[in-house]
Image: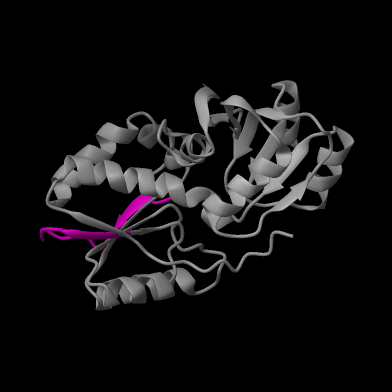
């Protein structure tokens, strides 16, 4: 896979979303060259540990959802140094992947069994609006918590605020801890709200509005969107190999 066909396919996949969001802020390319890329590693986060792991596995291109964060002081600079030292390219795509048809919310909703995506997660009035999916048949809260635990490979936080069965799921993967997203789930008649972070206000408001709540980690609620992108690349470019890079379950969700 050469860099220009790769970039062209990224523009084909994401279309208007790459116009709506700025390059080098919500998506970007680091250390690409004219070489052929054949071994791609993917992860949610860009960290020094991810780059070193990729180097050990002879990865020549890393795809992540998040770039190294500027406010994790010094880490982005160190990542850029390690990419250059190890001759590894990096592509990250944040909000466009959240809002893509195959992106973070829709991928997780489908894996949980949502056969009908009622609403794509999208950017609305400067904020992230939730994705909504409907299960083919109602499911108990206990069963849905068990399904989330198995899918994410980690213990999830949950708050039972009503005893109805679950059919309509509201979701914002990652940092969907805002009360505005919970209010949207309520207004959209969702039976549960699922996200990847919580605050005091999240749990207070969920309890106040009697909304069942499930919270996984930021990293593992979003990994399946990155996986979907990697698989699309593999379908397009038959000469590449894809590999999920290992990330730790070190976020506190309870």
The one of 133 and 38 positioned closer to us in this rendering = 133
Residue 201: % across, % down: 82, 47
> What range of the chain is rendered magenta?
24-41
Look at the magenta stretch and give its main secondary structure: loop
Q: Is residue 245 left or right of residue 56?
A: right
Q: Image quarter for residue 172?
A: top right
Residue nearest the viewer, comparing 46 with 143: 143
**Residue sitting at 64 percent across and 48 percent down?**
146
Residue 106 on image: x %, y %: 48, 34
Find the residue positioned furthest to the right. 208
Q: Is residue 38 magenta?
A: yes
Quadrant of the drawing holding the C terminus: bottom right
- Which residue is nearer to you in this view: 27 or 61? 61
Q: How is the image coloured?
A: one colour
Residue 105, given in percent of the width and then of the height, sits at: 52, 38
**For this view, does 242 lie left or right of residue 154?**
left
Q: In the rendered image of this protein, does residue 22 appear above or below residue 220?
A: above
Give the left or right position of residue 219, taking residue 233 as reference. right
| Residue drawn at the location 38% of the way across and 51% of the way down | 24
Residue at x-position 15% and y-position 60%: 33
For this view, does 1 lie left or right of residue 200? left
**Is residue 17 depicted above or below 73 in this figure?**
above
The count of marks equals: 0
The stretch drawn in magenta includes residue 43: no
**Residue 96 appears in view:** yes
Residue 187 in the image: state x and y as whole percent: 74, 22
């Amino acid at each position: 896979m050469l860099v220009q066909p790769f970039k062209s396919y990224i523009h084909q996949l994401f279309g208007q979303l790459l116009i709506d969001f700025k390059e080098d802020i919500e998506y970007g390319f680091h250390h690409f060259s004219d070489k052929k890329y054949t071994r791609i590693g993917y992860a949610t986060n860009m960290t020094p540990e991810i780059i070193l792991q990729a180097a050990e596995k002879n990865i020549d291109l890393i795809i992540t959802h998040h770039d190294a964060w500027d406010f994790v002081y010094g880490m982005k600079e160190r990542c850029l140094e390690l990419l250059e030292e190890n001759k590894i390219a990096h592509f990250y795509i944040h909000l466009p992947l959240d809002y893509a048809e195959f992106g973070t919310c829709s991928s997780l909703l489908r894996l949980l069994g949502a056969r009908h995506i009622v609403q794509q997660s999208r950017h609305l009035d400067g904020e992230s609006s939730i994705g909504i999916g409907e299960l083919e048949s109602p499911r108990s809260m206990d069963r849905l918590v068990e399904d989330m635990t198995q899918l994410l490979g980690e213990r999830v936080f949950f708050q039972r605020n009503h005893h109805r069965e679950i059919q309509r799921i509201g979701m914002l993967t990652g940092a969907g801890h805002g009360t505005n997203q919970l209010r949207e789930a309520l207004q959209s008649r969702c039976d549960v709200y699922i996200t990847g972070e919580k605050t005091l206000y999240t749990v207070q408001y969920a309890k106040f509005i009697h909304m069942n709540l499930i919270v996984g980690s930021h990293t593992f609620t979003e990994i399946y969107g990155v996986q979907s992108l990697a698989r699309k690349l593999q379908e397009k470019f038959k000469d590449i190999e894809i590999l999920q890079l290992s990330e730790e379950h070190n976020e506190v969700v309870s």
